[in-house]
Image (cartoon, rainbow, N blue to C red):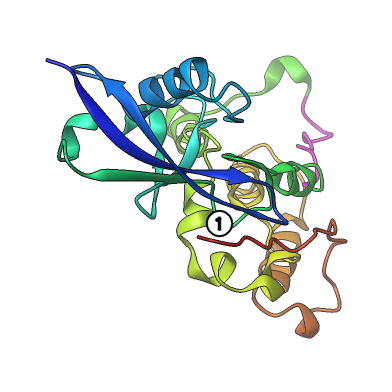
Amino acid sequence: MGYKAKFRVYRGDGEQGGLENYEVDVNEGEVVLDIIPRLQATQTPDLAVRWNCKAGKCGSCSAEVNGKPRLLCMTRMSTFDENETITVTPLRAFPVIRDLVTNVSFNYAKARQIPAFAPPTDIKAGDYRMQQIDVERSQEFRKCIECFLCQDTCHVVRDHEENKESFAGPRFFIRAAELDMHPLDARTDRKSFAKAERVCATSPSAAPTCVPSTSRSPTTRSSL
């Protein structure tokens, strides 16, 4: 049986904005990502929200629900009381573009700085062999769906603007770690490259060997 749910949704951009109240129809078995597009379709057509698969696979619908980083498609409405007011806000760790959409391009800029896989020069392409255990080790890193909730959870990035410009992001570390574990990767400087970036992330002033960082504008958000 359906009911009317009370929602507070952030509206605005990185410069100014606030929470607006809505009442939306909720049906049995739905998730928050059922409600937000319904709100968009029936009451506020200019609401900006990013989503794609609605299956917990693409990571697009990351946001904060009642102050906790969540995937909207995996947050069931049945976990909330019917009389509860549900607050949906954008990820705090990233600059807000508009409403629930944040700018996560910084992670992809960092990912492009990772040195590419370097095959051994003394092995012909057809002679490459990997043990299954090596395949499984690298596949483990590919389970990242790029939702970036781990960054939003990390207080070092989330609450301290001075750390953000040097933070590499999970995409960087995952790819670097995967290639570092690849038995056929011939690069010898990959570990030192990743180590330098980790130093940059924790203490930029102490790491003269930092790779170039992409500049970001600080996020300002009011009324949250």
Residue 189 lies in quadrant: bottom right
Residue 169 on the magenta span: no
Q: Residue 37 vs residue 18: left or right?
A: left
Name the residue: 59% across, 57% down.
93
Q: Residue 166 vs residue 5: left or right?
A: right
Taken as a whole, is the magenta stretch helix, strand or loop? loop
Image coordinates of residue 63 in percent, x first then y, are 48, 42
Name the residue: 41% across, 36% down.
71
Q: Amino acid at mark 1?
A: Arg
Decide which of 166, 18 is in the foreground and name it. Answer: 18
Image coordinates of residue 219 in percent, x first then y, are 69, 61
The stretch of residues the image draws in magenta is: 114-123
Q: Residue 69 vs residue 58: left or right?
A: left
Image coordinates of residue 12 in percent, x first then y, are 64, 45
List the residue tagged with mark 1. 92
**Mark 1 nearby-residue class (10 Å; few <14, some 14–19, many ≥20):** many
Name the residue: 32% across, 43% down.
86
Decide which of 9, 103 is in the foreground and name it. Answer: 9
Residue projecting furthest to the left: 1
Residue 119 on the magenta span: yes
Image coordinates of residue 81 in percent, x first then y, are 15, 40
When the figure is inspected, residue 41 is found, relative to residue 73, above or below; the finding is: above
Q: Residue 45 vs residue 194: left or right?
A: left
Decide which of 79, 153 is in the foreground and name it. Answer: 79
Name the residue: 85% across, 59% down.
215
Quadrant of the image containing the N terminus: top left
Decide which of 1, 60 is in the foreground and name it. Answer: 1
Res 76 seen here: no
Judging from the image, what secondary structure is the residue with disc 1 in?
Answer: loop
Res 34 seen here: yes
Residue 39 lies in quadrant: top left
When the figure is inspected, residue 49 is found, relative to residue 169, above or below; the finding is: above
